[in-house]
Structures are given as structure tokens and as C-alpha cells.
Image (spheres, coloured by chain):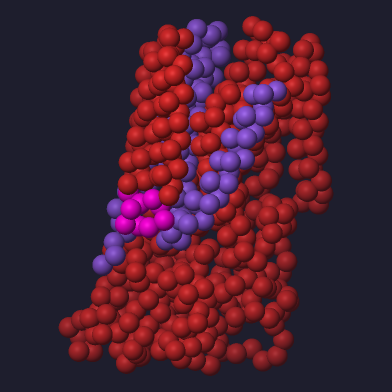
Amino acid sequence: MTDFGSMLFVFVLATFIGLGVIRRVSRLLYTPLMSLTNAISAIAVVGSIVVTGADHPLTIRILGAVALFASMTNIVSGFVITDRMLKMFKKQ
Amino acid sequence: MHLIGELSAVLATALFIFALYWMNDPKTARRGVIAGVTGMTVAVLATWIQPEIVHHGWIVGAIVLGFAVGIPLSRVPLTAVPQRTALSHAFGGLAAGLVGTAEYFLWLGENSAQLTPFRMSALVIEVILGFLTFTGSLMAAGKLQEVKWIPQRPVTYPGQNFVNLAVLGLAVGLGVTLVLHPHAAWGGQAFIAIGVLALAFGVLLIIPIGGADMPTVISILNAYAGLAAVAMGFVLNSKLLVTAGALDGSSGLILSIIMCRAMNRSFTNVLFGAFGKAQPAALKGEQKEWKQESVEGAAQLLEQARSVVIIPGYGMAVAQAQHKVRELYDALTKRGITVKFAIHPVAGRMPGHMNVLLAEANIPYSALVEMDEINPEMPQTDVALVLGANDVVNPAARYNKGTPIYGMPIIDADKAKTVLAVKRSKNPGFAGIDNELYVGDNTWMLFGDAKAVLGELVKQFGSGGIH
């Protein structure tokens, strides 16, 4: 139960921080914002690493490896394309 | 050991928040990417070095494959960025769904006492959100990519909302039952059924949604993908994951609200009321005629203007006319004419899409002006040049209750002294609505492919016609 309480606490605070920070994001940058948050939420990769790498039954590790691949794809393509788009924004 | 994990999670969280914070200005935004990559690397390494990780080959293999697919996906043309984004929501949902499934069967097989009501609820939410985001986003990506076997037009049938809600309700009902009886013999089958129902629901949810609603749908799926990551964080007891998911979710939520406002629609209306179904009542009264203008005449109008506002739509991007737009921008600014671009929040196929498309053509971002800021300037504008935009400049949105776009905020192109509209054909736009801007008293039409027409216009400013 303490688990649940502290997790919920983190979730609520993080949502407020998120709302506060995202509201200030430049309206020019909504497309790169989406690819950036996408890459960041692929931090789910840490979960997949544990499922894939620990000594679990084979089927479990296969599920983990597919998830790991999916998250990794998001991390790589998300960060690279965000940077590619941001490079294009020039003041003059 | 545990300490390293905790500290790296705190560091990664801080870096992620900074990454988003730096997005408040294009000048600092690239720093955000560096912060994000650093945070990610720290978190991945701290997880990887844990002693329980023994199958390193598997991890390396999956990471290499991720790079092999991720790098080509990051090089798509910018018109295809909405599809890529939808696809990445799909991957995010898939990862959450699969990890949830794996964890459930792990706990079920090894130690079913681990399946506390709290964990079980988090698992059910993770799997439902993850899998519905997966198929829903795949459908959205398919529609955006215009894949042949996915219908572009909204597919509707009687009782559709009932069917959708029944499928979701069944999944949730099974989930509640599992939470109440986590150790039941049929637990495994019920869990798989929940996953399958969620997969089906994702497809059913997106089928009735048309192209015009895609910016909103992508934002909503973004929020779902974030929430799926949050649920996964609850399952794995990872504060880092909960925080990152919450940041993603709140970003999706804010963008969804902005997109809905920009179309004067509610969430439920986007998700449960297929767009384009309501056909506009035919406009009564006299049918006005277009007035067509020649390229030479249009060039002269532009040359004599002091201020020009260009209103780009997705049609401009489809015609690959961005670089011609840039040439025209250069030709006009060289003559001392003020040129601005009016950007509607839903211009393009995802939030902010038009800004990226114009930035790619080297148009400085200081010339890109949001709808709310440009509208007060429209009455003093000499020429409004409409390029492939349609619904976002349709004055009928202000008063005609019979049209599906009624109440949608628009760019006041019709208030400019002269309107020049470039249009490929005389057909109505994406939402299938007639646009009375085109028959306005001060409007002149230029028919043809945007790239070709702009090319001709630029030529007029070059060696030929006007000097």
C-alpha cells in the first residue's frame, strides 16, 4: 500500500510539472516536442531490459526482447528526428 | 548497487524535465535533445549493470535491431513525420502491452502472491492502454500514409459507438474480475482475452475517424502512450518510468486540448462523432462565380503591396512547394515588402507540422505567426496569399451552423484588402465543404499546382516581367 501511495504521489507531481513545462513550449516546436516526449517515454526500455536480460523462461524473454526492440526504435528515431527538425529552425 | 540505480533515476528525471523546459525557445531547444539522450543513456546503463541481468546477447541484439529500424525512420521526409509519430506511439504501446503481459505471466508462474490487487489493476490498465494504443496508432499511421487497404474516409455503421463501448466494457469488466480473483484458474485466459479485446478496440476506435481529425487523434494517442508508460511504471515500481510517462501524457493532453479548441470540438466529439458525416446544408441565395487572375496580374498585385500574409495549408506541402514559397518570400522581402506566414494550429497533419515544413525551406521562424497574433493584423494586410489552405480560411465557420466546421476559429484571410488563392482544382477541401472565401468580392483565384503557380510567380519577379 505504501508502494501505491508513493507512486501515486510521484505521478500527480510529475503530471503537474509536465503541464507547467509543456505549456511554455514554443508553439513553433509542437512537432519536435511530440517526437521528443515520445523518445523520453521510451524510457520504458528499462523495464524491457530487466524482462529480457534476467534469467526468466524463454517465452517471457522473447516478449521482453520485442518490447526492448520497440522502445529502442523509439529512442533512436525519436531523438534523431527531433534534432533533425530543430536544426532547421533559424531566426534569420 | 541500489544506490546507483536510485541516483541515476533521479538524474535522468531531472534531465528529462530540463529537456522539455529547453523546448520553450528554438534557440535552446537542441540542448533539450542532448539532455534527453544523456538521461536515457544513464538510465539504460544503470539498469543494464544490475547483477540480475545475465542474458546480455539478447539485449545487444534487440538494441542493434532498434537502431537498424530507428535510423531509417528518423530520415523520412518531413511530410511523413505524422506517420512516423503515429508509428512511434504504436511501438510505445506495444512495448507497454508486451512487458505487462510478460510480468503477469512471470508472477502467475513463479509467485502468484505477488499479484496484489494494486499490481493487478496496474497490469490490466497497462495492457489495455498499451494494446489499444498499438493498434489505434497503427491504423492512424496507415491512414496518414494512405495505405491502400485502410480506408481514408471515415467508416461508420449503425450502432458503432455501442459496439466500441461494448468491446471496451468487456475488457474492463474482465479486468475488474481478474483484480478481484487474481489467483483463479482461468486467470491466464482472461488476461489474454483482455489483450485481444484491447487490440480490437484500438482498430474500432480509429476506423470512424477521418483525415481532418488526424492532428487531434495523434495527440490523443500520444496521451494514451504516455499513460501506458505510467501504468508500466506502477507495475514495475519505477518512479522514473512514472515520471517520464506522466511528462509524455501531459504533453499529449495539452496538445489534444489545443487541437480540439482549434477545431471547436470536444474529445468525445472527435472520438465518437465521425467528422464529415454531417453534410452542409446547401447555401441558399445566389451562387457566386470565381474570379480568375493571371500570374502576371497576381505578380503585380504582390509587387504593389506593402504587406503580404501567406496562409499555407497541407496542399502546399503535398505539392512540395515549400522551396518555391521561400523564393517568393525572398523576392518580396528584397523589395521591402513585409511578408508573414499565418499558421493555423491544425495546418498540416499534426500539431506544429506546418512550422517544420516551412523551417525546412529555410524560412526564418520569426516570420511564422500564429493565428491569434496575425488575425488583428489582417484588415491592414494588402494581400493575403492562400496556398493550399481551405477549411482554416472558410468564413462560413463564423456563422453557418449547417457546416461541420461551424465555430472553428479561422484565419481572417477574407478581411485582407485583396485575397489571392492558389488552388489545384475547383473541388472542395478535405472536409468536403464549399469555401465561400473563393467567391468573395476581393478574392482572385489562381488555379493550378501550387509549385507550378509559385514558380511562374517567382519568374515574374526575376528577369522577366516586373523589375
The tally of labels here is 0
Q: Is residue A12 above or below residue B107?
A: below
Q: Which chain is purple?
A: A
Residue B262 shown in magenta = no
Along the line of sight, the residue nearer the viewer: B289 or B232: B232
Q: Residue at x 67, y 92 (%)?
A: B286
Residue B27 is inside the magenta segment: yes
Quadrant hosting residue B385: bottom left
B423 lies above or below B257: below
Q: Residue at position x 36%, y 85% from top? A: B307
User: What residue is at 68 percent from the left and 69 percent from the top?
Assistant: B404
Quadrant occupied by the C terminus of chain B: bottom left
Task: Return the residue nearer the eye: B230 or B74.
Answer: B230
Segment colored magenta: B22-30
Give the percent coordinates (x, y) of residue B27.
Answer: 31, 57
Question: Left or right of A20: which side holds B467?
Answer: left
Q: Residue at x 53, y 36 (%)?
A: B243
Q: Quadrant of residue B54?
A: top left
Q: Residue B392: x and y, percent? A: 55, 72
- The quadrant the N terminus of chain B occupies is top left
Question: Image quarter for residue B451?
Answer: bottom left
Q: Residue A88 location, x and y as percent? A: 30, 56
Residue B384, horizontal then vertical, whole percent: 43, 82
Residue situated in front as seen by the camera: A90 or B187: A90
Q: In the image, is residue B57 above or below residue B348? A: above
Q: Which chain is red?
A: B
- Taking the image as shown, residue B42 lies to the left or right of residue B351, namely left
The reply to whether residue B398 is visible in this rendering is: yes
